[in-house]
Image (cartoon, helix red, strand yellow):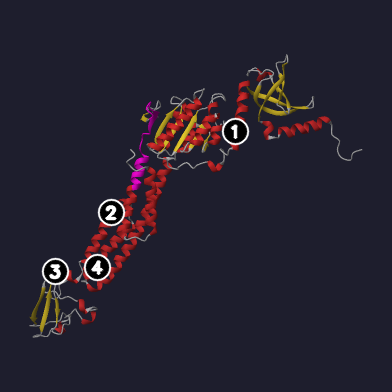
Amino acid sequence: MPTTNVYTVSQLTAYIKSLFAGDVLLADVWLSGEVSNFSQASSGHCYFTLKDAGAALKAVIWRTQAGRMALPRNGDAVVVHGYISIYEQGGTYQLYVDHLEGAGVGRLWLEFERLKARLADEGLFDAARKRPIPARPARLGIVTSPTAAALRDILRTLGRRYPLVDVLLAPTAVQGADAPPGIAAALDLLNRWSREQEPLDAIILARGGGSLEELWAFNDERVARAIVASAVPVITGVGHETDFTIADFVADLRAPTPTGAATLAAPDGRELSAAVGGLLGQAERQIAGRLEAERARVENLARRLRRVSPAARLASDRQRVDDLARRAGLARAGRLRHERERLRGQQLRLMALDPRGVLARGYAIVTAADGAVVYSVTQAVPGAALAVRVADGAFGARVTQNEQDPSTTPGTRRRASLRMLPQRTSNTLE
Amino acid sequence: MSESPSFEALYRELEETVRRLEAGDLSLDDSLALYDRATALAEQCNALLDRAELRVRQLSGRPDGGLAAEPFAATDGK
């Protein structure tokens, strides 16, 4: 006797069934194959075998499903969708069909798989072939039907997100026998325009949702070759989320829908606006910092000039510099030009403190016979000959009297060589 | 239309201008000139972003082999 558990057939079958039910692929699978042994029972349920050259699979279509689809006949190549589960009483696994595409579609499907394999072998789906789409395109091409909802969706999306983009439409049929050469010609037209007239940043190739047959042009090799040959990167937006076409595989970028393609092709203007604002903010912080540094330099210069300038004048200047400092600290975009002019005015004012400028305003430099600058009445004894320098030349003079101002002591001077004597009264300050 | 600079060109120049401002090795005058330029570029960028109308032209091949682009009237205005 076995030492471990002994299961019943039902228990094991239930276990296998639970394994099938937990499998993601088996729970939701698309299959292609040929129909054989098709029969419909009096209950309305349909039974058949789906097979290909190497394997066979039992399949069931429940009556409720069967009523909603065109039933296949023996020999039809079909594409079906459903789930795989266990039929316990029969000890078999089978496909429970909820969707079935007709014979023609089955052939299309095989064609699709063959072309896909061939183009993949050529390397046309390789990620290395995919070209980047410019982030901020100036000009986009669109290949689609001029009357379809897809075009409206694309134009609406571009208009909302990025209306400054320039759009060139190359209209074409997107379904039927004319569609593949039409799409190829439209792609070629846009490429010629890009080469000869105005460069295009990307081309959107789009079509709204439809049946497999309606989307078939996008599985045509001519379309695939035209996409590969396009010098302008191509973004596809064909059908719905779940539709994958050959065009999607060879495109530089695949979007799930036409609207999705427009979204991938153009940036969001609001984000760009924020980015522009961010850059401007950086510029403002830079210039405010710079003005602050210049203010510090000007203040430093003013501190040095204070030693050689009349005190009241400097106090006033200093106040202005402080005022400027406050303004520079608060500098905002609209006021910076104004600050710049103020700063220049300030520099002019400081230049005006140059001794030569002072002479021009009526002040004089007095020197003794030995050439030393007279900065004190003690150097001007009555009877002494002095030389007086004014703006346009010099003249000699003789001291008739001197009188020391009681509030002034010689020790306060720092730079005798630049001391200036007012001509008119001895204590005039400007 | 193609004579005026593209958004891309303006945006890149704005980025470059701010980068140069941040490098900080310029005279005050040059810095202020760059700042003025950045302000003007940002204004132009925003003006382009605010442009309301999407311009759409329809392309066709002429019998003589040339190309023609004509305004495309979208059936949906919104």
Question: Does the magenta portion include A282?
Answer: no
Question: Dot 2: within a 10 Å radius of its alpha carbon, few (fewer than 14), some, or many (20 or more) residues?
Answer: some
Measured as percent of width and height from the top left, residue B20 is found at: 38, 56
* Among the two numbered marks 2 and 3 on one chain, the one whose residue lies closer to the N terminus: 2
Q: Amino acid at mark 2?
A: Arg
Which circle marks residue A315 in the picture?
4
Tell me which corner region of the image, top left, top right, bottom left or bottom right, holds residue A160: top left
Q: Amino acid at mark 3?
A: Ala
- Label 4 to label 3: alpha-carbon separation: 22 Å
Q: Residue furthest front?
A: B64
Measured as percent of width and height from the top left, residue A59 is found at: 71, 24
Residue span colored magenta: B41-65
- Label 1 to label 2: alpha-carbon separation: 64 Å
Element class at badge 1 = helix
- Which residue is depicted at the point 34% across and 50% down? B38
* Among the two numbered marks 2 and 4 on one chain, the one whose residue lies closer to the N terminus: 4
Which circle marks residue A116 in the picture?
1
Tell me which chain the residue with mark 1 is part of.
A
Same-chain status of marks 4 and 3: yes
Q: Amino acid at mark 4?
A: Ala
- Label 4 to label 1: alpha-carbon separation: 86 Å
* Among the two numbered marks 4 and 3 on one chain, the one whose residue lies closer to the N terminus: 4
Same-chain status of marks 4 and 1: yes
Tell me which chain the residue with mark 3 is part of.
A
Q: Are marks 2 and 4 in contact (CB under 8 Å)?
A: no
The residue labelled by disc 2 is A337
Measured as percent of width and height from the top left, residue A93 is found at: 75, 28
Element class at badge 3 = helix
Viewer-side residue, A203 vs A68: A203
Q: Are marks 2 and 3 in contact (CB under 8 Å)?
A: no
Q: Amino acid at mark 1?
A: Lys
Same-chain status of marks 2 and 4: yes
